[in-house]
Each structure stands twice: as structure tokens, then as C-alpha cells.
Image (cartoon, grey):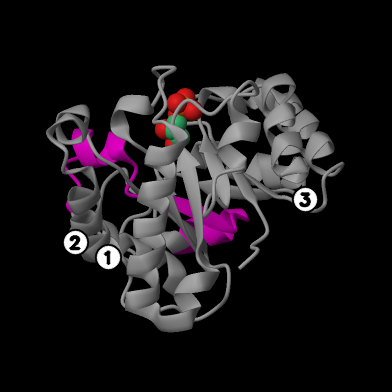
Amino acid sequence: MLLRKLVAGNWKMHGLSSDIDEIQAIAAAASDYPEVDVALCIPAILIERAVRAVPGLAIGGQDVHHSDKGAHTGCTSARMLVDAGATLTIVGHSERRDAQRESDAAVKAKAEAALGAGLNVILCIGESIEVRDSGTAIETVMTQLGGSLPQSLCEEGELALAYEPIWAIGTGKTPTSDEIEEMHAAIRGKLLDRFGSDGGQVRILYGGSVKPSNAAEIFSIPEVNGALVGGASLKAADFMPVIAAAAGS
Ligand code: 13P
């Protein structure tokens, strides 16, 4: 099935109010490619300002707490993101699974809380280099997926998966096209098993060192329905060619 490509930027812990100009430049670039869905997941504190500055661009968070509200110092609920104008959020990024010790069950709860609040979700999965080298990447990611997926889906497009091999994040290394194809096919199979034909509507993004020079090749791989982009999403000059490559694929 041909799904619209989704190209999402993950700004991680980058971005100050002085970077709103860059977000405006990215929104302007994105509007040249209406055939691609473009989103930027930015620090929560910048969301409201970004939404005011670029009302046409999908702005998202990078994490949510699983609770609606309560005594959770420093955390952000899905309703708070919605209140700030966000339309999506990342959950389960490997940097949080590692540093914040987020389990599959915790990621599942976050995904369900976000979907329940009306946010679209980009749910991240991916293996370490040790797992890749041991030859068990597919089994490991399938187990992660099984434990992290929300119980059910309601609307088309509300859930996207991001396959991000940890060893490819910020390293300039990427899996081979065959390795990406094999993993994305396995993820699609699991989604179809789990959600029936609705699993065919879930976009599967690739993430990890996506940049202007490799984007076209990555987007040409079967079952790659977009990308989650870190470093190359920080500047419009780098992000624009990635969006253009998605449009051309
Ligand atoms: P890089 O594109 O900088 O490798 O980061 C990928 C990533 O972690 C996106 O979530």
C-alpha cells in the first residue's frame, strides 16, 4: 500500500526562542512539498511559541507522562502538549529508554495516554550494536514492539513506528538497505498480525543518521514510509533536501 511519507524532525535538547526563525524557514520549505507530511518535535517549552509562529506546521513533543495529571515533578502530560498546540509526540526514544530506564510497558502506557488525548504518536524501537552483531536484531525489535504497541488503534495515521537502530543515531553509520528492508518488513508483518488491515495504515519511519546525501536511497526502500531525523532537522538548509527526497520517492 502506498502511504504518504512522514518526515519528522526530532530536535532533542536543542532549540531556544532565537531558533523560531529556523522553524519558520522549515515550515516555508515544507509548504513547497504538500505531498509530504512534515512535523517537528521540539522541546516542550518551545511548542506554544512555535505553534503561534507556524500555525500550518505539525509541532510535537518528544515524550509524555502516562498520567493525565498529578504529583510528577518535571513531567509533561499529553493534555499539556495538546493545550500548548502540539498535534503529535514521540514516545520510547532509545535515549529515554536508556537514560530514563523506560520499559516497553512504560512506553506502551505513554503511547496510550497520548493517543487517548488526541495526539498522533511516533513510537520508537531499535536494537543496540551488541544485539545487531549477535544476529538477533529482528527478534529483539519484535519483542520490543510486542511490549510497546498500544492496545488498539482508532484512526488512520494516528500511530507511526520509528525503527531507529541505536548504533546509527548520531554516528553517521546506517544499516544496509537490505537490513532496513528486512526490519521494516518484519515490523509490517507484526503490525498486520496485531491490528489486522489497520496495521497496513501505520507508517514505519527509519531513523538514524538520515541526511541529504542518503535520504533518497533510504526512501526508496520498500516499507520505508518516512524518516525520523535528528541532527539534519535542526537547520532548514539540511532538512529541506530530506523533505524533497521524500517528495521525489
Ligand atoms: P540523528 O539523525 O542525529 O542520527 O538522530 C536520529 C534520532 O535519534 C531521531 O530521533
- Nearest the viewer among 30 and 35 is 35
* Identity of the residue drawn at 44% across and 78% down: 153
Circle 1: element type: helix
* Identity of the residue drawn at 17% across and 52% down: 103
Q: Residue under circle 1?
A: 109
Q: Is residue 72 left or right of residue 208?
A: left
Residue 166, compared with residue 140, is above or below; it is above
Q: Give me the C-alpha separation between circle 2 and circle 3.
A: 34 Å
Q: What amino acid is labelled 3 in the image?
A: Pro
Q: Give me the C-alpha separation between circle 1 and circle 3.
A: 29 Å
Magenta span = 79-103
Circle 2: element type: helix
Residue 134 point in image, percent of width and height: 12, 34
Q: Residue under circle 3?
A: 55
Characterize the local packing of mark 3: few (<14), some (14-19) or many (20 or more) Cα atoms within 10 angstroms. Answer: few
Circle 3: element type: loop
Q: Is residue 149 left or right of residue 24?
A: left
Q: Does the rendering let one see residue 135?
A: yes
Q: Residue under circle 2?
A: 105
